[in-house]
Amino acid sequence: MKKTNPVLYTQETINCIIDIGSVAQEMSDEMKRQVMDSLFKEAVDNKIVWKGKGKDQRWKFRDHAGKIVAKTTEEAIKKAYIEALAEKEKYGRADMTFGALFKLWLDYKHEGVGIGSGLLSPSTYKRYVNDHKKYIAGTDFDEMRLCDITPIDIENFFMGIAKDFNMGKQAFKNVRGYVKGAFSFAKKKRILTTDPFEDSDLSKCFAQCKKGSKPVCESVFPADGVRKLLALVYESEKKDELYMPNYAIELACFTAMRVGELAGLKWSAVRPNEIYIEASEHRYDFVDGPSVFLVGEPKNEKHRRFPMTKEMVDLFNRIRKVQKKHGIESEYVFEGIHGRYTARKISQAMNRRCEKAGLICKSLHGMRKTVSSHLRTMLPRATVAEMLGHLDETNDGFYNFDIMEMDYKKQKVSEFWNESFKPHETGHPAKV
């Protein structure tokens, strides 16, 4: 008889099937193999594993999802069957806690983590981990067995965290997405036959989130505020011509470019009649390592053109002159003697300038909204959306603000009143 090599199983497979505890640490590899062989023999005796008849002589069994697994040799089917048992034991236990399920879901999501199109960003994965620690870990819900969780339990959990953390709507939506994803994963893996999340109603919980939006003064810059900011930027440029974030802030006031797009702007994108925005810096935060900054595609991978004005031409000429003077040769526009300035450095500079100017709004994102709102009063909505790299609906909903000054509004109300509603002089109380 031809001698066959023994089937080798990983320790994880063995541990999934045998609750070995402290005694099992003393089991020899041979003893563990005997346990596996016994499990396989029992499966064959009970027709759980069988050999085909007729032309199809392959060995077969159905996995926990009902799919037939077929192998040509007994050793191969034995290995596949034992591994399927381990998979079923790992994923097929409705008495596991939600916390244990969430860990399995995280492992599953981690398989798709990477840098590039179609992959789960490391930063997003890290947010999953951190938000679980912040909102879910240590709660009664996290310790509940899956088989005991009802839609009411889910609703009570979300009502509790919405109140306890005074959650914003976006934070609530994020956690809701995690829990929904974990239960959906449990159903797909046959851990649960029904998904209790599907029957839960979280509308009342969502209503407990912080209401209202920021006042306009916190979202956009007043016209005189932009003038104050630019005055400080010009002053700073004179004091330190090598500090590139000043020029980046100046360009943002013209173009409403995202901070990542400013950090990733290359000289090849600066053309005679336009800026071709085709790159952006991205920050990737890893759970078990330092953050990484890479320049790649812009947000939504949407390239766009922004018209070049004579003021922008002057700005770029000033930057080129400074870089040439100090021997800086780089493909990036905002690079100094110590390298390219990151989005974080540019944002920090913006915050400092706004603080010094006494402005309430302090972000480059606020400048993006400000420029968009002004352009929207002069250009069609579709044109402005295209220039900023948005859908029309996105631009209308989140980047279109009331930017008219109060004195101007006062003037227009007076004009409207005089033209439309002003009574005849003889009937006015002051004239009687």
Image: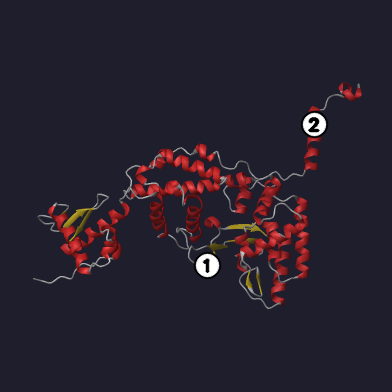
Q: Residue at x 51, y 46 (%)?
A: 173
- Local packing at callout 2 (Cα closer than 10 Å; few below 14, some 14-19, many 20+) is few
Q: Residue lying farthest bottom? A: 327
Q: Amino acid at mark 1?
A: Pro
> Residue 34, relative to residue 42: is it above or below?
below
Q: Residue lying farthest left? A: 1
Q: Which mark is residue 429?
A: none
Q: In which quadrant of the rendered view does residue 12 lie?
A: bottom left
Q: Identify the residue position indicated by label 1 in the image.
A: 290
Element carrying mark 1: loop
Q: Which mark is residue 417?
A: 2
Distance from the alpha carbon under mark 1 to that under mark 2: 62 Å
Q: In which quadrant of the rendered view does residue 346 lie?
A: bottom right
Q: Earlier in the sequence, mark 1 or mark 2?
A: 1
Residue 242, position in %: x, y? 71, 72
- Relative placement, left or right, of 411 versus 208 is right
Residue 239, position in %: x, y? 77, 70
- Local packing at callout 1 (Cα closer than 10 Å; few below 14, some 14-19, many 20+) is few
